Image: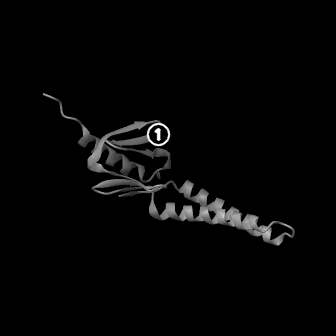
Amino acid sequence: MKIAYKNKRILLNLIIGIVWIILGSSYFFETGTSLWRPYVIITLGVFYLSLAAYEYFYKYITITDQQISINVFPKKKMNIDDIISVNYYAGDYTFTSSDKTIKVLKSQINPKDLPRFEVFLKELTSKLKPTDPL
């Protein structure tokens, strides 16, 4: 199951990238400007366009039967069998294992994919319920 980023985030990165590229290209039409400035600005624009493409194609969260991975830099992975607890606080879902913690921001999840993610969380938390000690 793949959970996408919000479309607003992807569109914003796309618009920022286009604006930076147009701004950087406009420096080529001026005389007397330094030569490095347009290249830096165009590079920044290309970075934002690349970021928008990455977020569109690689989605925010990838959930398989064995692991959950968050596609941010650096990529975070956690085996589902290693998860000890799942908490929700202030718009963040926190997955905790014995050696690491992963946070998933609810504000970054596409509203169309949010119900599927919440169903996954309910199933996962029902598996994590500790049994009563004797």
Quadrant of the drawing holding the N terminus: bottom left
Q: Characterize the local packing of mark 1: few (<14), some (14-19) or many (20 or more) Cα atoms within 10 angstroms.
A: few
In the image shown, does 120 or 130 lie closer to the viewer? 130
Identify the residue at horizontal 87%, vertical 68% (top origin). 32
- For the residue marked with disc 1, what is the amino acid? Gly
Identify the residue at horizontal 47%, vertical 39% (top origin). 91
- Residue 29 coordinates in the image, percent (x, y): 82, 72
- Residue 23 coordinates in the image, percent (x, y): 74, 64
Quadrant of the drawing holding the C terminus: top left
Residue 32 vertical placement versus 112 (above, below): below
* Left or right: residue 116 compared with residue 130: right
- Residue 17 coordinates in the image, percent (x, y): 64, 62
In the image shown, does 24 or 120 lie closer to the viewer? 24
Residue 82 vertical placement versus 15 (above, below): above
Circle 1 SS class: loop
- Residue with the most extreme top position: 134
Identify the residue at horizontal 51%, vertical 63% (top origin). 54
- Residue 94 coordinates in the image, percent (x, y): 39, 41
Name the image quarter holding residue 88. top left
- Residue with the most extreme left position: 134
How many numbered callouts? 1
- Residue with the most extreme right position: 32
* Left or right: residue 11 compared with residue 41: left
Q: Which residue is mark 1?
A: 91
